[in-house]
Image: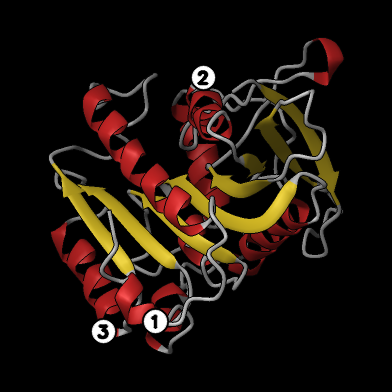
């Protein structure tokens, strides 16, 4: 399926500098079916950059905190080409314009600095605005999923607190186990899970590499136990890989293409089962828990 690319600048309330959040949109292109309706997916990454071309076309050019060309466009484009409208919010709009952050020591330091300067509430606002955009999109059917990697995996996890998000696939999500996201490095993600904010809601898929030094085994065990104790419908996939193993550029020798392909299929099975079809109201959440990837 062909895809088109565009963006919208959405005003925010929590940005003290008054900067809008730029949300990139990649959507299926069926010119003969202008009224076609598709489910929506919010894709979170750490930072986004663009390169302009004719007709306001763009390339999403980031991966993790580094704005390198290719990985995000390919990831989001693969989702969109399967019949989903993809919205990618620019995470660090409070600090940077849409220009790429260099893949170097200085760029790394900037990205990590911004991660703990931005308020958790501001991350949540960006997610809400992206979900609002999808729900109100003329070609969206209102059924929403979320996904992301690294910091984006954590943001996709938090997006599941929004009742409109029916599924979240979180790739090597950082800072959940340590509760160190955002300003003050004291987020409430697992606290909210324990108090039931995900119980009886959408499905969560967690994907980790067993050699991930950013989220070691005790951290992964804590996340898994917290989800299970709270009776959250979830899948927990641990594979033989390192952190950021799906990044196909500047991977530092960690990219595993075959494993990425297999797990991308697991994510799409989750999305196809939860948002691609409208099955009506679920009458048995416990029964649905048996049907996981």
Q: Quadrant of residue 88?
A: top right
Residue shown at 79%/23% (left/top)? 31
The tally of labels here is 3
**Nearest to N terminus: mark 3 or mark 1:** 3
x%, y% of residue 251? Answer: 32, 24
Residue 95, horizontal then vertical, whole percent = 70, 44
Q: Which mark is residue 229?
A: 3
The answer to whether 249 is drawn above or below residue 66 in the figure is above
Residue 95 lies left or right of residue 222; in this view the side is right
Determine whether, in the image, residue 189 is placed left or right of residue 123: left
Of the image marks 1 and 2, the number of the one nearer the N terminus: 2
SS of the residue at dot 1? Answer: loop
The answer to whether residue 117 shows anywhere in this view is: no
Q: Earlier in the sequence, mark 2 or mark 3?
A: 2
> Which residue sits furthest top?
54
Mark 1 and mark 3 in contact (Cβ < 8 Å)?
A: no
Name the residue at 39% across, 19% down: 249
The crowding category of the residue bearing disc 1, from other C-alpha atoms within 10 Å (few below 14, some 14 to 19, many at least 20), is few
- Comparing marks 1 and 2, which lies closer to the viewer? 1
Disc 3 is placed on an element classified as helix
- Label 2 sits on a secondary structure element that is loop
What residue is disc 2 on? 70
Q: Residue at x 31, y 82 (%)?
A: 231
Q: Nearer the viewer, mark 3 or mark 1?
A: 1
Instruction: For the residues labelled 2 and 3, say whether their Cβ atoms are less than 8 Å apart.
Output: no
Q: Nearer the viewer, mark 2 or mark 3?
A: 3
Looking at the rendered structure, which numbered label has been put on residue 284?
1
Whole-number angstrom distance, CA of label 3 to CA of label 1: 19 Å
Q: Dot 2, how many residues are within 10 Å of its Cα: few (below 14), some (14-19), or many (20+)?
A: some
Rate crowding at label 3 as few (under 14), some (14 to 19) or many (20 or more) other CA atoms within 10 Å.
few
Nearer to us in this view, 141 or 26: 141
User: Closest to the observer: 204 or 154?
Assistant: 204
């Amino acid at each position: 399926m062909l895809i088109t690319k565009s963006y919208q600048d959405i005003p925010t309330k929590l940005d003290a500098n008054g900067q809008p959040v730029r949300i990139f949109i990649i959507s299926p292109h069926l010119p003969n079916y202008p009224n076609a309706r598709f489910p929506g997916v919010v894709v979170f990454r750490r930072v986004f950059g663009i390169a302009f071309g004719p007709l306001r076309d763009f390339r999403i050019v980031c991966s993790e905190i580094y704005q390198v060309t290719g990985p995000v466009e390919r990831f989001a484009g693969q989702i969109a080409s399967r019949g989903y409208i993809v919205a990618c919010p620019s995470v660090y709009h409070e600090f940077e314009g849409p220009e790429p952050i260099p893949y170097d020591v200085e760029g790394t330091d900037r990205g990590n600095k911004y991660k703990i300067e931005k308020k958790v509430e501001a991350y949540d606002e960006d997610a809400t605005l992206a979900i609002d955009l999808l729900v109100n999109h003329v070609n969206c059917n209102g059924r929403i999923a979320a996904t992301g990697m690294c910091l984006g995996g954590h943001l996709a996890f938090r997006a599941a607190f929004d009742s409109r998000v029916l599924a979240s696939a979180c790739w090597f999500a950082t800072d959940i186990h340590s509760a160190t996201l955002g300003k003050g490095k004291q987020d409430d993600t697992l606290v909210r899970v324990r108090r039931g904010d995900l119980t009886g809601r959408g499905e969560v898929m967690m994907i980790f590499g067993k050699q991930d030094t950013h989220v070691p085994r005790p951290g992964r065990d804590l996340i898994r136990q917290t989800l299970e104790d709270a009776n959250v419908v979830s899948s927990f996939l641990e594979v033989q890989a390192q952190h950021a193993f799906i990044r196909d550029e500047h991977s530092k020798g960690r990219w595993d293409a075959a494993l990425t392909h297999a797990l991308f299929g697991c994510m799409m099975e989750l999305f196809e089962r939860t948002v691609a079809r409208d099955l009506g109201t679920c009458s048995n959440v416990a029964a649905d828990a048996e049907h996981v990837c």
